[in-house]
Image (cartoon, rainbow, N blue to C red):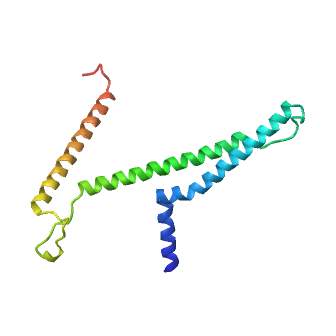
Amino acid sequence: RIKMQQQQLSQQQDFDPVHRFKMLIPQLKESLQNVMKIASLNLTHNTAIDNGVKSSDTSVQRFDKSLEEFYALCDQLELCLRLAYECLSQSIDSAKHSPNLVPTATKPDTVQTESMSYAQYLVMIKSQISCAKDIHNALLECSKKIAGKGQPQGIM
């Protein structure tokens, strides 16, 4: 049972963009250090070649590969931040547009300060139904326009 809970926690952390971001930061730091080290070695090597001290036969690490790895980590971090932002926006919208608790006659002791009256609840639900109908109608209209474009124009 404990092992199962640990697996669930691990899976939740894998999908949590903030946790993933925190896990990627040390890798990014290490990658940046590697980029700087390789750049320094390549600069030193090229300076020695330019000064005639060394020939170009010796191999050096490829700067472009290390830079590509660094950029790949930056891209992953950017995606994590975008996903975290989207999750936050969705949470805010959900809290804004979804109903709070409505006290019922069977459980009047569960009335909370953030609960709404039944009349407020009905107004909000009617608003949501109206919005859903508008979206449905817009999708129907778009599908009719798309279907209309597929028909030959000359035959009517």
Between 37 and 146, the residue placed more toward the observer is: 37
* Front residue of 45 and 12: 45
Residue at 24% x, 39% y: name it. 138
Asked whether 138 or 64 is in front, the reply is 64
Instruction: Using residue 153 as the reference point, say whether residue 21 is left or right of it.
Output: right
Q: x and y percent of residue 106 in the render?
A: 12, 76
Residue at 45% x, 48% y is 82
Q: Is residue 85 above or below residue 16?
A: above
Q: Residue furthest top?
A: 154
Q: Would you place residue 134 above or below residue 7 in this image?
A: above
Where does residue 28 sit, x and y in percent of width and height? 61, 51
107 to the left or right of 83? left
In the image, is 95 to the left or to the right of 103? right
Residue at left 65%, top 50%? 31
- Residue 51 point in image, percent of width and height: 86, 31
Expressed as whole percent of the image width and height from the top left, the position of residue 90 reads: 34, 53
Q: Quadrant of the C terminus?
A: top left
Q: How many marks?
A: 0
Position of residue 53 in the picture relative to residue 110 (left or right): right
Quarter-of-image position of residue 64: top right
| Residue depicted at x 56% and y 46% | 74
